[in-house]
Image (cartoon, grey):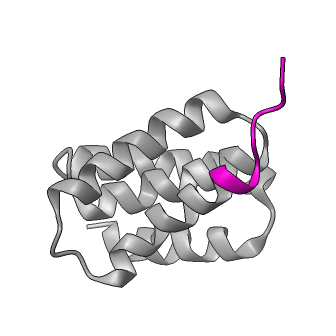
């Protein structure tokens, strides 16, 4: 299974600070998690939240919102999750609130 290296990749990309170069591997990580896990998997939620954080930084808010909504729903289905697994969802939510959408 690719999941352990995938988790390490997610963490490394999240910490790299280079959202543009992280998008493609993060999308792949989400795709792999969707193949391996159920819809409310905390691991899929973490992958989605990490990609959402990246997309927020790149001002791709519509897709980021969808991913963040999915990750938040998964977190709600897993109230017993450890803080380690909740952290990506909380991080993405915080990033979203720090980058308000411009007024139109």
Q: Quadrant of residue 14?
A: bottom right
Picture coordinates of residue 70, whole percent (x, y)? 35, 42
Picture coordinates of residue 6, whole percent (x, y)? 43, 68
Instruction: Give 79 or 24, whichever is nearer the viewer.
Output: 79
Picture coordinates of residue 87, whole percent (x, y)? 45, 74
Q: Where does the N terminus fall, quadrant-wise?
A: bottom left
Instruction: Give 95 or 67, whichever is nearer the viewer.
Output: 95
Q: Where does the C terminus fall, quadrant-wise?
A: top right
Q: What residue occupies the far top of the structure in this picture?
A: 104
Residue at image location 17% in from the left, 68% down from the top: 79
Residue at image location 76% in from the left, 56% down from the top: 19
Q: Is residue 97 magenta?
A: yes
Quick check: 45 above or below 27?
A: below
Task: Considering the whole magenta stretch, tell me its main secondary structure.
Answer: loop
Picture coordinates of residue 30, whole percent (x, y)? 42, 48
Magenta region: 96-104
Instruction: Give 103 or 96, whichever is nearer the viewer.
Output: 103
Quick check: 69 above or below 99?
A: above
Q: Is residue 28 left or right of residue 39?
A: right
Q: Quadrant of residue 58?
A: top right
Quick check: 60 above or below 71?
A: above
Q: Is residue 75 left or right of residue 98?
A: left
What is the count of numbered marks?
0
Q: Is residue 81 left or right of residue 13?
A: left
Q: What residue occupies the far front of the structure in this picture?
A: 103
Residue at image location 66% in from the left, 34% down from the top: 61
Q: Quadrant of residue 50?
A: bottom right
Quick check: 101 above or below 37?
A: above
């Amino acid at each position: 299974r690719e999941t352990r290296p995938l988790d390490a990749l997610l963490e490394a990309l999240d910490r790299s600070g280079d959202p543009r170069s992280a998008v493609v591997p993060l999308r792949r990580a989400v795709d792999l998690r969707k193949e391996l896990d159920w819809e409310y998997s905390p691991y899929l939620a973490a992958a989605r939240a990490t990609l959402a954080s990246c997309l927020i930084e790149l001002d791709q808010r519509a897709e980021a919102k969808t991913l963040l909504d999915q990750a938040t729903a998964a977190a709600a289905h897993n109230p017993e999750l450890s803080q380690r697994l909740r952290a990506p969802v909380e991080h993405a939510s915080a990033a979203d609130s720090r980058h308000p959408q411009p007024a139109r």
